[in-house]
Image: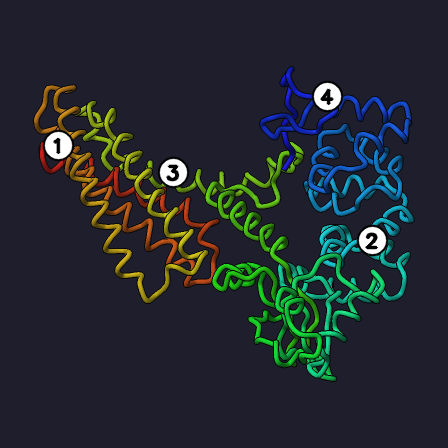
Amino acid sequence: MAEVASTNPTSDPRSLRDEDGDLNLAFVELVTQAITARDTARVLELAGDLHEADLGGLLEALDHDDRPRLIELMGREFDFAALTEVDDKVREEILDELPTETVVEGMSELESDDAVAILEDLDKEDQAEILEAMSPMDRANLRRSLDYPERSAGRLMQTTVLTAPPFWTVGQMLDHIHEAVDDDLPDSFFEVFIVDPTHHLEGNVFLDKLVRARRSAQLVELMQERHSVHVEEDQEEVARVFERYNLVSAPVVDDDGRLVGVITIDDIVDVIEEEAEEDIKALGGVSAGEDLSSTVLWITRSRFTWLFVNLVTAFLASSVIGMFEGQVEKMVALAVLVPIVASQGGNAATQTMTVAVRALATRELSANNASRVAIREVSVGLLNGVAFGILTGIGAGIWFASTGIGIVIGLAMVANLVCGALGGILIPLTLDKLGYDPAVSSGAFVTTVTDVVGNFAFLGIATLWFGLY
């Protein structure tokens, strides 16, 4: 997501970030001036040593036309991994502006997982153009990764792994690492994977154990079994495996148990952030693809659907009030107080729904404990309903100088908070059971339940209490 540049006057203009960690506007201006002057030496002096994440932040802070110019001026010093740190739409715009040869040259230096992350959001035509310009080996590796389902382990993994047979000694392994050329080794790795002649995974040896062992010791003596993930496993499930077993890396295997790649913790951190962001956006009826660089028309279209659903459900809730039109006309206080009951129930239901949706996403809530959690939430709704029923009843009774109004709204508040809590847990559970994403679908239905129940309870109890027939 794009960052806001800082205007802190105390910031060092030669530093990308200020003391608060925000992008330094003065630094961005210096880079912009160097780009305008086409001063390659100055651009490299300012941006040549930036980490890929900071370089990505700088790209987002620059104007549209200056982004590809910065890459061209930096030449081979530009780390294309920075493109994985920018918004999808910004990345697509940059790739559209760059010559294919520049893109291919930059991506040839990347690990396969970063290269796939850059390619996977492009149109098929653009993907094909870039892949065709690559070396046959790079093209084959990337096409194989892109053939795996989106959001799967196959898209996350890097295909360059360090392997050895079980009968090798520690000395042989260390010599192999020392003598290997850079292209034969991953940029960073934590372990050696032990495989048989057909590349089936047998286990691994972590580097700390490797460097501490005797050179004469065989790898099979140091080997341990690993928690592996299937190449088509959903990325959210992979993240859950990392969390459950406190992993820093995990081997990826195919249907036959052959080692095809490895996933490292830096990729999983991105997955966790991405999944959490999607859940938060979905709860608000916002598309997962929306970000600060999205256009007005795209955002308008993406938000329209759920706003329309909310409009339809709002008419349903209003129709309940229409059923009591005559009673409302006889007692104006009812029209004034109706929104209070519906609003309070909606807020309580949203609290329960948020907890339920997140628990479903993390697999903490299931059929095994659903009844216990539902009873707990209903109990919370009942206690809060009684507490707010008393408070609201006293306030309404004093406001309208009517004990009856206070009692009616108090009883309605209890009923609506209990129903809201029940709806907040049962609706996400039901949607999940039916195969729908509860994060996306729950909000509109839960709001409708609380509005309908709140309006019906308040006006119905008032009708019975005051005899407004």
The residue that mark 1 highlights is 468
The residue that mark 4 highlights is 13
Quarter of the image for residue 236 reads: bottom right
What residue is shown at x 67% (from left), y 78% (from top)?
A: 219
Q: The residue tagged with tag 2: helix, strand or loop?
A: loop
From the image, state whether disc 4 or disc 2 is nearer to you.
4
Position of residue 59 in the picture relative to residue 267 (left or right): right
Q: Label 3, label 4: how many angstroms apart (C-alpha)? A: 56 Å
Q: Are marks 3 and 2 in contact (CB under 8 Å)?
A: no
Q: Earlier in the sequence, mark 3 or mark 4?
A: 4
What residue is shown at x 42% (from left), y 51% (from top)?
A: 358
Question: Where's the C terminus, which quadrant?
Answer: top left
Q: Residues within 10 Å of mark 3 (few under 14, many from 20)?
A: few
From the image, state whether disc 3 or disc 4 is nearer to you.
4
Q: Earlier in the sequence, mark 3 or mark 2?
A: 2
The residue that mark 3 highlights is 315
The residue that mark 2 highlights is 109
Q: Identify the mark at residue 197; answer none if there is no mark.
A: none
At label 1, the amino acid type is Leu
Q: Label 1, label 2: how many angstroms apart (C-alpha)? A: 78 Å
Q: The residue tagged with tag 4: helix, strand or loop?
A: loop
At label 3, the amino acid type is Phe
